[in-house]
Amino acid sequence: MTIEPLGSRFYLGLDLGQARDYSAVAIAERRVELTGDFDRVNYLERTGTRILVTHLERIPLRTPYPQVVDRVRALTQRHQHRKLEIVMDATGVGAAVRDMLTQARLGVHIYGVTLTGGERMAVVPGGYCVPRHDLLANLRLLLEKRMLEIIVPGDMETLLRGEFLRWGRHSAHDDLIFAVALACWKAGGQPISLHGNVPLPLIYPEVRR
């Protein structure tokens, strides 16, 4: 069965690190495709949605935030003819970095996501306040529905797989998983709310190289 693409939108997830934590960038493509099936009730061709993580990187430790902004600028320029949005960690220093990205005039929408310990998502000027567990619960849902594919080089895939498997236990780093979660939270459409600490399942999407 041939699957025909209809259109795509792209979401750049940016998780900001500190002195002992990496900053990480992920780019997710939300792709809508014709499935080849026909809905005989509504007389429409059926469509399906997939989310493909096509770029993932760690920025070296202690990289100054202006250089992080430069890296994000370079990535947005690669996608200048595509529909791209930035979804970034606005917690702590994130607000200042968001201002730097805004001042860089990248020509894309920038949404700040402030992670909270609450139970409800809230829309705020310039972005959202999102419970930390909701962000990961959305990623969990995409995995369970088999909507998410990771298409990144082997070294990044190995690091990300390790973060998936260690989630919920003490881990030195969780930057990659949060960069992916930020991008996929917006790419996945409607945010969901699952209260309490929701562990990621031991499901990992098929990896294409």
Image (cartoon, rainbow, N blue to C red):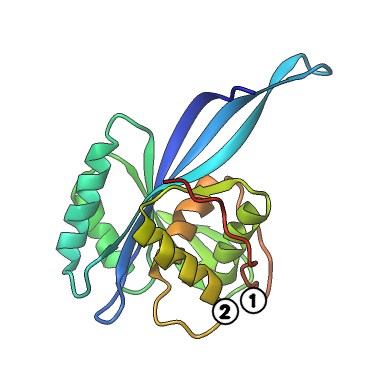
Q: Position of residue 77 (x, y in %)?
A: 22, 39
Say whether disc 2 or disc 1 marks the residue closer to the N-terminus: 2
Which residue position holds label 1?
197
Residue 133 picture quarter: bottom right
Q: Name the outermost residue toward the top.
A: 43
Answer yes or no: do the residues labelled 2 and 1 have beta carbons within 8 Å? yes
Mark 2 Cα shell of 10 Å, populated few (<14), some (14-19), many (≥20): few
Marks 2, 1: nearer the viewer: 2
- Left or right of 122, for residue 10: left
**Residue shown at 61% from the left, 48% from the top:** 190
Left or right position of 80 against 173: left
Establish if 57 lies above or below 186.
below
For the residue marked with disc 2, what is the amino acid? Gly
Q: In whole angstroms, how far apart are the C-alphas of marks 2 and 1?
A: 9 Å
Above or below — where is 66 with respect to 195?
Answer: above
Determine which of the numbered discs, if any, sits on residue 168 in the image: 2
Judged left or right of residue 11, residue 198 is right
Q: Position of residue 189 (x, y in %)?
A: 58, 45
Q: Quadrant of residue 154?
A: bottom left
Amino acid type at circle 1 is Asn
Image coords of residue 94 (percent x, y): 32, 67
At a point 33% along the width and 63% down the height, the residue shown is: 24
Report helix, strand or loop for mark 2.
loop
